[in-house]
Every structure is written in structure tokens, then in C-alpha cells.
Amino acid sequence: MVEKKTIKLDDVAELAGVSKTTVSRVLNNRGYLSDKTIKKVHDAMDKLNYRPNVIARQLFKQKTNLVALVFPTVDNPFFAELEAELEKRFDQLGYRVLMGNSQNNPAKEQDYLKLLLNHQVDGLIVGSHNQGISEYQKTTRPIVSIERFVGKQIPVVSSDNYQGGLLAVQRLLNDGCKHIIHTNYPINLVSPNELRQQAYEDLMNKHNRKPITYSVSFDVSDEEKERVFRKMFREHPEVDGIFADNDTNASLIIRVGKEFNRHVPDDLKVVGYDGANITRTLSPELTTIQQPIPEMATKAVELLLQLIEGKTNVKSVTLPVKMINSTTA
């Protein structure tokens, strides 16, 4: 059996009558080359059926056309839709996407960060909730965050959380609610969610109402969240309005409320936050503040590409939100 010869760069150069360096420059589109020279190299590649070593070319260019997305989980409708929108946009631009669900495990998130620092991916978009990852403070590599503060030099794409909080609480006040409770992340988690809580407190104080916030960790089980919500109903049987920090929690609150004979919209009003398509399909009874997920994805991709191209002073972006009324309103 005759062993098939491996075609190398030298073979292409010899057949084309050019140097190996010239072939490499053609493959990597570097420097000025005449159309005649480029054609000779491509003709030789076609005749020899030469296939460039893609990995080697990527290393030469220090570009992989691979980006990583790190979010808590795709089980959440907001993150699932956001990841899908990001992947679609990157695919249209010729990038492959590595999706990582950190489950709010700092070690997993650091693994993806190492891929970026080691030039194995071109950029990183993060939206998980881990705190204290020091590498974010030091690196100047291309990173964009969505709805999360990770480092002073890292731009953030977020919705207008303060305006969203105002819209939600004002809706409950307009519906006649007297005792409005808010749920949000624990105060030790630095996130734009803090602005939702700030808006809630500002508007409650303006109307001489006592603000009450129950802390709910994102990464605990639904059973643990339901225990918090049962405690809320037991401790505040007078509650008639709830501004939930996300739609998943809002849906759980509606379910738990039924255990206490509280029903939406008859004697309990609930406003969520996110407005993902799947939530609106499965829970049409939920009034919510809709984040512009497609626009957030578009802007995050734009900012990351600017950073990959070496641009500096890339600014954070805040996008408008809107109220989505329930079908039972």
C-alpha cells in the first residue's frame, strides 16, 4: 500500500514558484500582494488539494473567531433567550460560540476566563452572579458584561433598571395597592438589580409607604425560594401588591399565593421583570417589565467586537424598558 503524501506549505510554494513566506502571507491576508501572485498560490493549492492548517493560521493571527458566553443557567427564560440571541448574531458574523453555564460556581467562571487570557477565545460575554473574581479587575482583554458589574474597565449592557422599578411600583399604586413588597437579590450582590430596589424604595417613601424587601438568592432551588415567599405571606398577610425581581420569582409568588387563598388579580397584584418570550407564552396572566433582550444582545455583540478590534474607551449602555400588561388586566 502506497502511503499518501501529506501536502505541505513548501509544496504549494514550489508549484506556485514563490517563497513559503509569500504563501503564508496569502493564506493570512497580510501585506500587499499582486493579484497575479495571489492567483498563482490559489491555483497551486487547488491543484495539490491543499487544506490550510486552520489552528496554525489562528495562532498566527492571534484570532480564533471563537467567543465564550458565561451565564448562570439556560433554565431561566431570560438567560435562555439572551444566549440564543447572542449566538444568532455571532453566527451571522462568522464567529463560533462556546456557551458556559456557571451555575454561579466561581471556579467554572474562572475556567472560561482562562480561555480568554490564554488566547483560546477572542472575547467573553458574562452575566453570571459570582463575586470577587480578581482576574476581571486586572485584565484588559475583550470582556462585556450584561446586567452585572465585574470591573471598572468592563462595559456593561443593561436595561434601565431604575425606570423599570418606577414603572412596576407605580402600576401597583395605580391599581390601588396599599401594602407593596419587593423581592430582590441579597444586598451583598453588586448588580444593576440594586436600581430596581432603589426605585421601589424611593417611590414607596414618596407615598409615605414603608418599603419591605425580601432577599432571594438567584441560585437556590425553587423549593427554597417558595419557603421565602411563604414566610413573606405569613409575616405580611396584609400584602396586596408585590414587585418581583424577575418573572420566575413572580410566577412562584403567584403559585404560593394560592396556598394562602390569594389570587391574581382579584386580591393580589404582582409585577415581574424580564418579559422573555417563553414567560409571556406560559404565564400570560403576569404583568411584567420587559427588558429589550434582542437589542441587549445586539449591543453586547457590537461592544465586544469593538474591544476585539482594539478600540478603547468603549462605554456602557443602558436600554429602555416597557410595561407588558397581563391578559387578565
Image (spheres, rainbow, N blue to C red):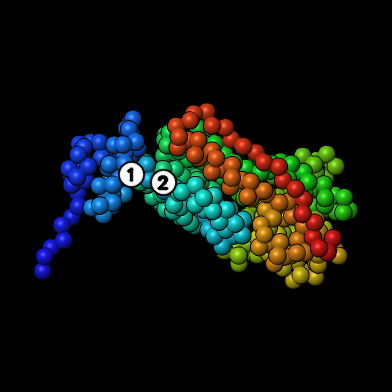
Identify which residue, 179 or 309, lies in the foreground: 309
x and y percentages locating residue 22 in the rendered image? 25, 36
- Which of the 4 image quarters holds residue 222? bottom right
Identify which residue, 315 or 109, lies in the foreground: 315
> Callout 2, which amino acid?
Asn
For label 2, the residue is 65
For label 1, the residue is 58
Q: Quadrant of the C terminus?
A: bottom right
Q: Which mark is residue 126?
A: none
Residue 140 vs residue 179: left or right?
Answer: left
Residue 1 vs residue 201: left or right?
Answer: left
x and y percentages locating residue 50 in the rendered image? 26, 52
Residue at 23%, 52% in the rendered image? 48
Q: Are marks 2 and 1 in contact (CB under 8 Å)?
A: yes
Image vertical order of residue 258 relative to residue 81, above or below = below
Q: Earlier in the sequence, mark 2 or mark 1?
A: 1
- For the question of whether residue 239 can be seen, the reply is no
Identify which residue, 307 or 125, lies in the foreground: 307
Find numbered disc 1 in the image and state the secondary structure of the residue it sits on.
helix
Residue at 63%, 62% in the rendered image? 225
Q: CA distance from mark 2 to mark 1?
A: 8 Å
> Callout 1, which amino acid?
Gln
Report the residue that reaches farthest toward the top: 313
x and y percentages locating residue 170 in the rendered image? 82, 47
Q: Quadrant of the N terminus?
A: bottom left
- For the question of whether residue 87 can be seen, the reply is yes
Find numbered disc 2 in the image and state the secondary structure of the residue it sits on.
loop
The residue carrying pointer 1 sits among few (fewer than 14), some (14 to 19) or many (20 or more) residues within 10 Å by Cα, namely: some
Residue at 46%, 55% in the rendered image? 100
The residue carrying pointer 2 sits among few (fewer than 14), some (14 to 19) or many (20 or more) residues within 10 Å by Cα, namely: some
